[in-house]
Amino acid sequence: MPNNSNAKKAMRQSEKARLRNRTGRTTLRTLIRKFKTAVDSQNIAEIEPAFRQVTKRLDQAAAKRLIHPNKAARLKSRLSRHVPKPQATT
């Protein structure tokens, strides 16, 4: 238990930050899971919007330092391999 008012405030702040970070990470994991299920189902109409949403959220999480920026880049790179390339029309 905190012994002075500064420690009490720090404890309150860290608890708020912990909950905020936890919900942010949970949301991120859920979006990644949805993208992977779209890839598994081979539904091309779902894959592209899901990938765009995941990359946007990864960038936002990295900007807020919820996750490390290098981790966000690594995840985006790995997920982008599953997005089908557009077919060239000639």
Image (cartoon, rainbow, N blue to C red):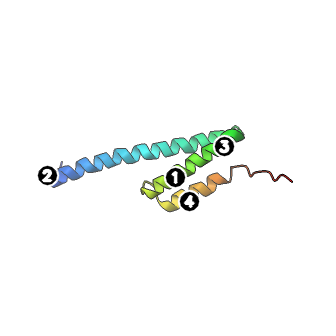
Q: Are marks 3 and 2 in contact (CB under 8 Å)?
A: no
Q: Residue at label 2?
A: 5
Q: CA distance from mark 1 to mark 3?
A: 16 Å
Q: Amino acid at mark 4?
A: Ala
Q: Position of residue 15 (x, y in %)?
A: 29, 46
Q: What distance separates the C-alpha of mark 2 from that of mark 1?
A: 36 Å
Q: CA distance from mark 4 to mark 2?
A: 40 Å
The residue that label 1 is drawn on is: 58
Question: In the rendered view, does 62 fall on the left or right side of 7?
Answer: right
Mark 2: few, some, or many residues within 10 Å (few <14, many ≥20)?
A: few
Q: Which residue is mark 4?
A: 73
Q: Earlier in the sequence, mark 4 or mark 1?
A: 1
In this rendering, would 84 be left or right of 15?
right
Neighbor class of circle 4 (other Cα within 10 Å; few <14, some 14-19, many 20+) is some
Q: Position of residue 33 (x, y in %)?
A: 57, 42
CA gap between label 3 and label 2 equals: 51 Å
Q: Circles 4 and 2: CB distance less than 8 Å?
A: no
Q: Amino acid at mark 3?
A: Ile
Quadrant of residue 77 within the rendered picture? bottom right
**Quadrant for the C terminus in the image:** bottom right
The Cα atoms of the two marked residues, 4 and 1, are separated by 8 Å
13 or 1, nearer to the observer: 13
- Residue tagged by mark 3? 47
Question: Going from the N terminus, do you reach mark 3 or mark 4 first?
Answer: 3
Image spot of residue 68 (x, y percent)? 47, 59
Is residue 77 found left or right of 29 in the rendered image? right
Mark 3 or 4, which is nearer the eye?
3
Q: Residues within 10 Å of mark 1 (few under 14, many from 20)?
A: many
**Within the image, what quadrant is residue 44 found in?**
top right
Where disc 3 sits, the SS reads helix
